[in-house]
Amino acid sequence: VQLQASGGGLVQAGGSLKLSCAASGFANKRYAVGWFRQAPGKEREFVAAVHRNSDNTLYADSVKGRFTISRDNTENAVDLQMNSLKPEDTAVYSCAASNTIIFSSLQRGSMYAFWGRGTQVTVSS
């Protein structure tokens, strides 16, 4: 199982970016996929997740209404569309895969067995 995050970059506040997590070694819906972020000097925090074998999604309160997570089955990927970006969204964003069936647990990084290398998102004010 391998994951690769891409799509990060520099954007002004209020702008948008789309991150993509390309998966290999497993079928797209077999695992739940989550996005996490870590800003300098801060702990890693949950951003969003999509459950395995369904389109149920979960979001951190800080991104609800601005970010959308979705599966791209044709590309075996999970995308994170980020709109109305704020300077506090600046972080390294990583995607991870989990085979847990407990939807509510997807906010915990410890539930994820596979992690991809992160991509930097910088939002200027």
Image (tube, rainbow, N blue to C red):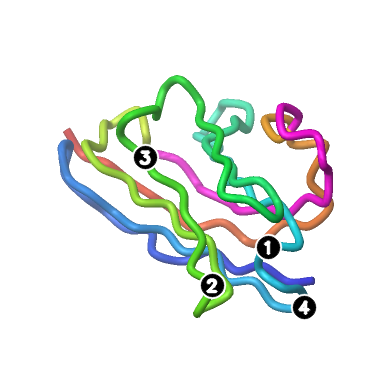
Task: Using residue 16 as the reference point, say whether residue 25 is left or right of it.
Answer: right
In-image side of 29 versus 86 (left or right): right
Q: Amino acid at mark 1?
A: Lys
Please tell me which of labels 3 and 1 falls first in the chain: 1
Which residue lies at the image location 32% right of the left edge and 58% below the top edge? 9
Give percent across and percent down for residue 96.
68, 53
Image: magenta residue range? 90-105
Residue position for label 2:
73
Q: What residue did someone put label 1 on?
A: 29
Q: Residue furthest front?
A: 54
Label 4 to label 2: alpha-carbon separation:
14 Å
Q: Which of the 4 quarters of the picture holds residue 24? A: bottom right
Marked residue nearer the N-terminal end (4 or 2): 4
Q: CA distance from mark 3 to mark 2?
A: 19 Å
Q: Residues within 10 Å of mark 2 (few under 14, many from 20)?
A: few
Task: Give the alpha-carbon distance from disc 4 to disc 3, as whole Å.
Answer: 27 Å
Is residue 24 shown above or below 44? below
Q: Secondary structure at mark 2?
A: loop
Mark 3 against mark 1, which lies toward the viewer?
1
Q: Secondary structure at mark 3?
A: strand
Q: Which residue is mark 4?
A: 25
Q: Nearer the viewer, mark 3 or mark 2?
A: 2
Q: CA distance from mark 2 to mark 1?
A: 8 Å
Between label 4 and label 2, give the one nearer the viewer: 2
Front in this rendered view, residue 123 or 85: 85
- The residue carrying pointer 3 sits among few (fewer than 14), some (14 to 19) or many (20 or more) residues within 10 Å by Cα, namely many
Of badges 4 and 1, the one in the foreground is 1
Quarter of the image with the C terminus in it: top left
Asked if the residue at tag 1 contacts the one at tag 2, i.e. Cβ–Cβ closer than 8 Å, the answer is yes
